[in-house]
Image: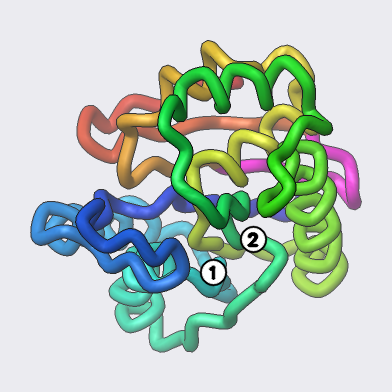
Amino acid sequence: MTHVYFVRHAEPNYDNHDDALRELSPKGLADRALVTEVLRDKGIAAVLSSPYRRAVDTVTPLADALGLPVELVDGFRERRIDSWIEDFEAYSRRQWADFEYKRADGESLGEVERRNIAALEGVLARFSGKAVAAGAHGTALSTILHHFRPGFGYNDFQRIRPLMPWIVRLDFEGAECVGIETYDVFTRQAETL
């Protein structure tokens, strides 16, 4: 069985509007230690990450503790939105209602899902039978969950928005997802999805 532990990044510095370079807040820097605490003994063979700084910075202490490099996987990056959106809630709700809806300078959730699933398929092929950790993002990770659990939708996305960091373990037999478990690093509670 292959286990992929997706790690949604810790709290970022929202004052930095450059999505790719947004660093962690002081709280985020402290909270990332919880990720290492939870995953240190899971037999992680590789640490992967979205190339965005907040995702990399969240999994770097885990990689350091395990003596592993952080390998960047461009396909795990967050949804692209290049211009300011005044009413983000309405935009997000519309994207969840229509997975192909997007603005001219952005990505639809369908595009994000297809990109993330293609990257995940590559990871499954490379690390079959192993456990890996992957730094990720809320929207991108939500599209992965939607792919394997089509009932995962806007309300679920809203529920997980404040969870940073957050861990989701996907279990695979070959390319088939046979289990999903979420883990709240603050309460230490696991939930089967």
Which of the pair 65/107 is nearer the observer? 107
Q: Main secondary structure of the magenta part?
A: strand
* Left or right placement of residue 53 versus residue 177 in this view: left
111 on left or right of 187? right
Coordinates of residue 61 in the picture (x, y in percent): 29, 74
128 sits left or right of 5 in the view = right
Label 1 crowding class (10 Å Cα cut-off): few <14, some 14-19, many 20+?
Answer: many
Q: Position of residue 82 (x, y in %)?
A: 56, 56
| Amino acid on which disc 2 is placed | Phe
Q: Which residues are magenta?
A: 169-177
Left or right of residue 137: residue 12: left
Q: Is residue 186 above or below residue 127?
A: above
In this rendering, does residue 5 appear at all?
no
**What residue is at 65 percent from the left and 42 percent from the top?**
170
Q: Are marks 2 and 1 in contact (CB under 8 Å)?
A: yes
Q: Position of residue 100 (x, y in %)?
A: 83, 32
Provide the residue designation for mark 2: 76
Q: Amino acid at mark 1?
A: Ser
Judged from the image, the secondary structure of the residue bearing numbered disc 2 is: helix
Residue 166 sits in which quadrant? top left
- Is 31 magenta? The answer is no
C-alpha separation, residue under disc 2 versus residue under disc 1: 7 Å
Name the quarter where the C terminus is drawn: top right
